[in-house]
Amino acid sequence: MRSHVSSCTKVQEQMANCPKFVPVVPTSQPIPSNIPNRSTFVCPYCGARNLDQQELVKHCMENHRNDPNKVVCPVCSAMPWGDPSYKSANFLQHLLHRHKFSYDTFVDYNIDEEAALQAALALSLSEN
């Protein structure tokens, strides 16, 4: 299904015309609009949408294995430390080596680099 949705222009046109998020019940709370999407990504080669990290790797290996174009890694560019203008010379190798796991499992996006370092040091000292 995901493969079809990501490649079917008719489905993509319909999705583009779908209404945006609307709360189920009325609320006085603002709808968050500045939360970055770090769960699904767009293929940098063809624009296929809503691919999680594993699907992005599979899609690129199946459809873009021999594409010589330098592209920006959508996973890296979604991260706070990512450079949205850096183009990887070998995107497929980058995906295979740098994105073997989901950052959500290991990263707390709400703390800065120094706090993350301190937390890692404290955890490593407590384990011994």
Image (cartoon, grey):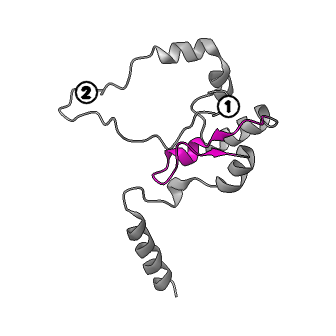
Q: Quadrant of residue 53?
A: top right
Bin the neighbour count of mark 2 within 10 Å (Cα to Cα): few under 14, some 14-19, many 20 and up. Answer: few
The span shown in magenta is 67-88
State the residue position of label 1.
Answer: 45
Q: Residue furthest left?
A: 28
Whether 82 is among the magenta residues is yes
Q: Say above or below: 81 vs 25.
A: below
Residue 86 highlighted magenta (yes or no): yes
Q: Amino acid at mark 1?
A: Tyr
Judge whether 113 appears above or below 50 on screen: below
Work out whether 124 lies above or below 54. below
Q: Secondary structure at mark 2?
A: loop
| Quadrant of image for the N terminus | top right
Residue on which the image places disc 2: 25
Question: How many discs mark residues in the rendered view?
Answer: 2
Whole-angstrom CA distance, mark 2 to mark 1, is 39 Å
Query: Which mark is first along the chain, 1 or 2?
Result: 2
Label 1 CA crowd tier, 10 Å (few <14, some 14–19, many 20+): some
For the residue pair 39 and 44, the one nearer the viewer reads as 44
The three-letter amino acid code for the residue at tag 2 is Val
Residue 24 picture quarter = top left
**Residue 16, percent across and down?**
49, 17
> Dividing the picture into quarters, in which one does residue 111 lie?
bottom left
- Pinpoint residue 62: horizontal percent, then vertical percent: 78, 34
Task: Indicate left or right for 14 with 69 as reference.
Answer: left
Say which mark, if any, is on residue 85.
none
- Give the percent coordinates (x, y) of residue 14: 52, 13
